[in-house]
Image (cartoon, rainbow, N blue to C red):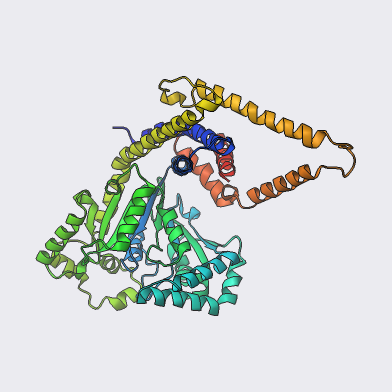
Amino acid sequence: MSTWLETCQQQLARLEITSVLADKLVTLCSKTGEDISSELVQKLNAEHARLNRQLERLHANRFEVAVIGLEKAGKSALLNAWLGQEILPSARERCTFTSTEIWSAQTEQDQLLSIQYYSKEEIGKLQQQRKEALDRTLNDKERKEIQEDFDDTEKNLSAIHEFTKQKNGYTQSFIDISEVNEQLQSAIFKNRAQSLAIKRIQLKTVRLRSDRDIVFHDVPGFNSGIQMHSDQAIDRLKGCDAIIYAKEMKQPSITGPEKEILLIADSEDPSIKVSDKIFVVLTQADALDDQIDFRETLEKHRNYWPAVPERRMIPVCARAHLVEFGIPSEDTLRRNKSADDKLKLKKIGITDGILILKDTVNHYIDHERAEVLQKRCDALVNNMRQYAGDVLLKLEPVYGAIADGDVEEDDLLGKEFNQWWGREWQRIKKDFDVWYAESIQGRKEADALGAEHHELATLHAAYDEKIDALLSNLTTGQMDELKRIYTAGRTISMPDPREGNYKIREELFREIQQK
């Protein structure tokens, strides 16, 4: 069996070739005057996006985990127990739908807290969506929460707009994670104006495995009635490498919103079954009374997840882990009505489960994810070849026959494709030359001062505006992202630092091309 790094290198080479084909197909579909069906174009664009996301993760050697579950399923407490520090709020009162990412850091000096705020326009859009949501049919809980967010935003609008002025957000370096505890609590939970203004929180810490880039996405928003929150949650699920699904132990069922979560996860990674990459974490396991109750409830959960290996269905008690290791918050201690969590778990016959969960995820990272990656990349390559065949078959009667026959995978573009594309490009260039000769060169005083043709002036203005917009907000141009690309790239196949610079240029080109 190939190691992860070997599989990563092999699939990276395959997808780089496939990416060139995908780029040309997308360009072709947007340039040709022929009718490529909207359904095919939509499929091609979706697959192209999946391909680019997978390439990005392969370049960075990044392993992304989506932590999902309904509100109050215990996701924050679970992550706190994993990190060994209660920094994410898990209080009884409702927290906002803030997107939180936890990244592995290479060294203590690389640890960083970053907070990104919504723009003033996005705050306005959120308020409009809240208004629209309140006009729909909602249950009492949903209506109360959306109305509360709407009213609190209106009440704190001036303070919220002050946060939106921080275009570059807020960053704070730290050595000990406790140094940012108060700032995190304030941002997510205590300062209402700030929490309503926050779009994303990113925490880089050595408390995750630092021998590779690991990202935990704490995914909120699925049971929010606000479209922007739902869109953010879906975006976090796209192409994730694994899912930690937090489900209350005492609730052996799958509700409507939970089914929706899983259907989205399935559709965003269609080549991989959810059961191949999910860890079902049964939270608050201490809520059960005895071993018989525990075994019966666990069996009910397994009946809902027959395809998930038993080793990946793990009962946990995050609170017991935090209390035992002396790292609970005051709120956790306040809710811990007695100090016998450990005794309750012993009575049931289990541990708090956190170390078992860590070992299971680490085993997946080291031994199972290579096979999942192989499946995903096989599907990406095969699908793109299929779409290429469909597009060229549609255009064959117009632009000339293309020789039949299978194309080897290492020559996905194919000689015939390149010959055909060359002819098509010549046609496009000829059309442009005719327009330029007739509209620009063929007029009187074409070179006179201030005599620029109005069509060309419009073209210049549109071009300049497009370039300015393109370069104004490039993710790749940010210092943290430049550092990540430069250093992460060297973990796979880049012994020469010069190749880090090459990868930066490559990522910059890819981002600009996507825009």
* Horizontal arrangement in the rendering, residue 287 relative to residue 508 (left or right): left
Residue 322, position as x, y percentages in the image: 30, 67
Question: Residue placed at 43% from the left, 70% from the top?
Answer: 96
Could you tell me if residue 233 is visible in this image? yes
Residue 341, position as x, y percentages in the image: 21, 70
Residue 488, position as x, y percentages in the image: 48, 43
* Horizontal arrangement in the rendering, residue 497 relative to residue 429 (left or right): left
**Which quadrant holds residue 369?**
top left
Most foreground residue, 50 or 366: 50
Question: Residue placed at 40% from the left, 31% from the top?
Answer: 10
Question: Residue placed at 57% from the left, 62% from the top?
Answer: 169
Residue 262, position as x, y percentages in the image: 32, 55
Residue 496 vs 124, above or below: the answer is above
Most foreground residue, 420 or 105: 420
Residue 297 vs 511, above or below: the answer is below
**Which quadrant holds residue 320?**
bottom left
Quadrant where the image shows the N terminus: top left
**Which quadrant holds residue 372?**
top left
Question: Residue placed at 74% from the left, 48% from the top?
Answer: 461
